[in-house]
């Protein structure tokens, strides 16, 4: 038998036992013939069966015509009327119960479109929820007729809704990283929207001390407000996160933001040079296509003299994952201005420079962060230290380290918990350490 003949015989068998709508009969043969929707395919099958009936003779084909009329195929009802036979009432589809219809698709799509018009987007994806009993009916039918050419009923729903939305918004369907996920429940004529975040990457420089990277709550009241914090609830009034995040939140009309830095510096360290890489995540944004030059300008006005950003560009969740995995392999260059408790000789500095070249530093978790972090030993590379005397007791160090090395402890030794350390090597205790991050070097994502 020819393929078309096989399809028609099987369709006729199915329809004689189960009245199915155009979508549901067409879907059983979805793998046969591309470029058709299941509804078109179903209608074509019914049209072929009608033509067959005409060829055989209308009188002889009453049964087939009745079967087609019962499945809601109007031309079959009209043919029966013409030969004086009362056509049967169309019955509800044996799989979807008549839910798959152009009108219902249109109605639900219009509701979705109304909400979507509040958002900027250029791609989306539609998912569908289908009741278990509908799936069971379809499974039983496929087992009964040994159907191997069918597709999931979800395909019909997502394709039809997707098509209407695409026409309206000039947006594409995107499966990997959709900006908006529309989950439809055609059976209850309901839907939910998931608006995915926008990611912006760039570099920040911190020109002043005592601005933590993220909000730092008061350690006495944990944000409630108390005497200690002048009822602000915070240790520091500002953070890099807010200086960068607030103007972006406003421009993107997002609900909230999250600031992800490539590692972090001490609150009293500055960041200069190129700056530290970061990714800003803007959740549930209504705007998506913002001029980042304008955003950069607004952030830099907002953070004037404190925090500056540069090199803003659009990023992705994939790059965020990469950024997070990165901080242990990134290398950092610091400047430390240190005042010691006594004079430091040029000779000791040169010896120290020699000894602290390309070595591994062993650090137990610093006492100052022990409350927040587990006590363990970290081994991090120190690439070099360069020292320059600024006064009898004052030295400027430039050092390049692997990410995650605690630099203050490298200098003061943290009571012997960091080995080796500069304090022991020089035989002097530091009284004051002034730290600046000069450079954060990160590899760029591959592929
Ligand atoms: Zn149906
Ligand atoms: Zn407080």
Image (cartoon, helix red, strand yellow):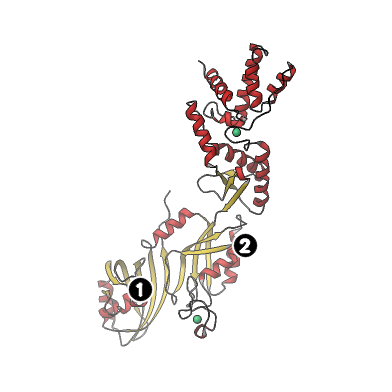
Element marked by disc 1: helix
Q: First in sequence: mark 2 or mark 1? A: 2
Residue 278 appears in the figure: yes
Q: Nearer the viewer, residue 419 or 53?
A: 53
Snapshot quadrant of residue 40: top right
| Disc number for residue 444 | none
Query: Can residue 148 be seen?
Result: no
Residue ID at (58%, 67%)? 246
Question: Residue 427: percent from the left, percent from the top?
Answer: 26, 83
Residue 414, x across and y down, in percent? 31, 78
Q: Looking at this view, is 321 or 428 the one in front?
A: 321
Please say if the residues under marks 2 and 1 sit with CB atoms less than 8 Å apart: no
Judge from the rendering whether residue 125 lies leftward or rightward of residue 376; answer left or right: right
| Residue placed furthest toward the bottom | 342
Q: Which residue is mark 1?
A: 407
Q: Position of residue 132 (x, y in %)?
A: 52, 41
Q: Which residue is mark 2?
A: 251
How many residues crowd around disc 1 within 10 Å: few (fewer than 14), some, or many (20 or more)?
many
Going 67% across and 41% down the picture, which residue do you hit? 106
Residue plotted at (43% across, 55% down)? 444
């Amino acid at each position: 038998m020819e393929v078309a003949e096989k399809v028609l015989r099987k369709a006729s068998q199915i329809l004689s036992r189960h009245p199915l709508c155009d979508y549901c009969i067409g879907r059983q043969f979805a793998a046969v013939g591309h470029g058709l929707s299941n509804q078109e395919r179903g209608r074509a099958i019914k049209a072929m069966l009608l033509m067959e009936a005409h060829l055989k003779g209308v009188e002889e084909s009453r049964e087939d015509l009745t079967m087609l009329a019962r499945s809601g195929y109007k031309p079959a009802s009209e043919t029966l009327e013409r030969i004086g036979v009362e056509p049967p009432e169309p019955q509800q589809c044996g799989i979807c119960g008549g839910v798959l219809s152009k009108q219902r698709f249109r109605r639900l799509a219009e509701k979705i479109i109304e909400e979507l018009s509040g958002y900027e987007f250029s791609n989306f994806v539609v998912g569908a929820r289908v009741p278990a009993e509908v799936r069971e009916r379809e499974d039983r039918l496929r087992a009964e007729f040994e159907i191997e050419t069918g597709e999931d009923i979800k395909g019909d729903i997502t394709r039809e809704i997707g098509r209407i939305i695409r026409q309206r918004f000039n947006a594409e369907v995107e499966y990997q990283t959709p900006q908006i996920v529309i989950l439809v429940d055609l059976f209850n004529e309901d839907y939910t929207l998931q608006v995915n975040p926008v990611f912006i990457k760039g570099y920040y420089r911190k020109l002043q001390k005592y601005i933590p990277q993220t909000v730092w709550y008061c350690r006495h009241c944990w944000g409630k407000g108390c005497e200690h914090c002048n009822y602000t609830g915070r240790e520091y009034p500002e953070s890099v996160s807010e200086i960068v995040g607030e103007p972006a939140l406003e421009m993107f009309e997002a609900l909230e933001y999250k600031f992800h830095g490539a590692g972090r510096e001490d609150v009293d360290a500055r960041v200069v040079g190129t700056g530290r890489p970061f990714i800003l995540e803007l959740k549930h944004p209504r705007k998506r296509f913002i001029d980042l030059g304008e955003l950069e300008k607004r952030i830099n006005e907002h953070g004037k003299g404190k925090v500056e950003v540069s090199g803003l560009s659009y990023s992705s969740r994939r790059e965020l994952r990469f950024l997070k995995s990165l901080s242990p392999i990134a290398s950092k260059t610091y400047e430390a201005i240190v005042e010691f408790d006594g004079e430091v000789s040029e000779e000791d500095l040169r010896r120290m420079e020699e000894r602290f070249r390309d070595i591994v530093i062993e650090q137990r978790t610093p006492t100052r962060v022990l409350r927040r972090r587990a006590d363990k030993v970290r081994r991090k590379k120190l690439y070099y230290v360069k020292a320059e005397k600024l006064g009898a007791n004052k030295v400027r160090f430039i050092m390049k380290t692997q990410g995650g090395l605690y630099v203050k402890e490298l200098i003061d030794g943290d009571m012997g918990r960091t080995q080796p350390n500069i304090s022991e090597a020089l035989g002097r205790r530091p009284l004051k350490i002034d730290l600046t991050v000069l450079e954060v070097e990160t590899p760029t994502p591959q592929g």
